[in-house]
Image (cartoon, helix red, strand yellow):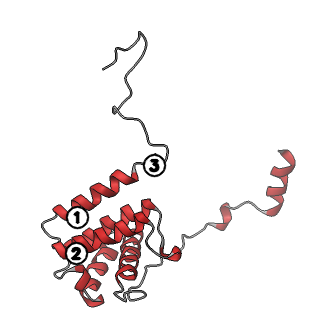
């Protein structure tokens, strides 16, 4: 190892950031796939199907309209693993009824965003493997937040602010 000059520090972490992957999604995807394969609650057939899905996305072997960002693939692999761990059948052999109870629990116990992300992952996985799950599950549409209109600026107040600026 090269000696450091005075006032020089070693970089944290010991490696440089990949400018093509600054968020380390490649490594995150590898780790998500390893976690899926290592899970005692995910059968080998499901782990292989999830890995095939991820590899095809990463290699661009999917139609353009089905191509996902690598960050989405990382998240989807995790959601697919969670789903596979929760159902009693191989994910590749599951039907919508097998998945509905899990998705209902996720919708009530967690956030609507988490529920909808699970469904998006299942749709992408289903589309890749030709399972026909598209539109089989309902996304949860959260109620819009209530707006206190008394706290909003009037048109005259906005114009006064613009003139003052």
- Sequence order check, earlier mark of 3 and 1: 3
Q: Position of residue 163 (x, y in %)?
A: 87, 49
Q: Which residue is mark 1?
A: 36
**Labels 1 & 2 near each other (Cβ < 8 A):** yes
Q: Residue furthest right?
A: 163
Q: Position of residue 49 (x, y in %)?
A: 27, 74
Q: Residue at x 41, y 68 (%)?
A: 57
Q: On the image, numbered disc 2 is attached to which residue?
A: 46
Q: Quadrant of the N terminus?
A: top left
Please state if 86 lies on the left or on the right of 50 as rendered: left
Q: CA distance from mark 1 to mark 2?
A: 9 Å
Label 3 residue SS: loop
Identify which residue is drawn at 34% across, 53% down: 28
Within 10 Å of disc 1 (Cα), the crowding (few <14, some 14-19, many 20+) is many
In the figure, residue 91 lies in which quadrant? bottom left
- The answer to which quarter of the image holds residue 128 is bottom left
Q: Earlier along the polypeptide chain: callout 2 or callout 3?
A: 3
Task: Answer left or right for 161 relative to 17.
Answer: right
Residue 107 pos. (x, y %)? 34, 76
Q: Secondary structure at mark 2?
A: helix
The residue identified by callout 3 is 21
What residue do we see at 32% from left, 68% from top? 79
Q: Nearer the viewer, mark 3 or mark 1?
A: 3
Task: Tell me which numbered mark, 1 or 2, is placed earlier along the sequence.
Answer: 1
The answer to whether residue 143 is seen in the rendering is: no
Depth check: give the residue in front, 119 or 111: 119
Q: Quadrant of the C terminus?
A: top right
Tag 2 near tag 3, CB within 8 Å? no
Task: Tell me what residue is drawn at x 43 percent, y 60 percent.
Answer: 70
In the image, residue 163 sits, relative to residue 12, either above or below, namely below
Q: CA distance from mark 3 to mark 1?
A: 22 Å
């Amino acid at each position: 190892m090269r000696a450091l000059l005075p006032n020089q520090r070693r970089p944290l972490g010991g490696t440089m950031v990949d400018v093509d992957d600054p968020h380390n999604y490649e490594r995150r995807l590898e780790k998500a796939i390893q976690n899926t394969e290592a899970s005692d609650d995910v059968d080998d057939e499901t782990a292989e199907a999830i890995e095939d899905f991820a590899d095809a996305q990463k290699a661009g072997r999917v139609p353009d309209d089905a191509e996902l960002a690598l960050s989405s693939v990382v998240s989807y692999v995790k959601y697919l693993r969670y789903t596979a761990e929760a159902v009693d059948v191989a994910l590749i052999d599951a039907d919508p009824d097998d998945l509905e109870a899990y998705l209902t629990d996720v919708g009530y116990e967690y956030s609507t965003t988490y529920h909808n992300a699970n469904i998006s992952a299942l749709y992408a996985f289903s589309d890749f493997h030709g399972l026909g799950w598209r539109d089989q599950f309902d996304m949860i549409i959260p109620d819009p937040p209530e707006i206190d209109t008394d706290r909003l600026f009037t048109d005259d107040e906005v114009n006064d602010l613009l003139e003052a600026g």
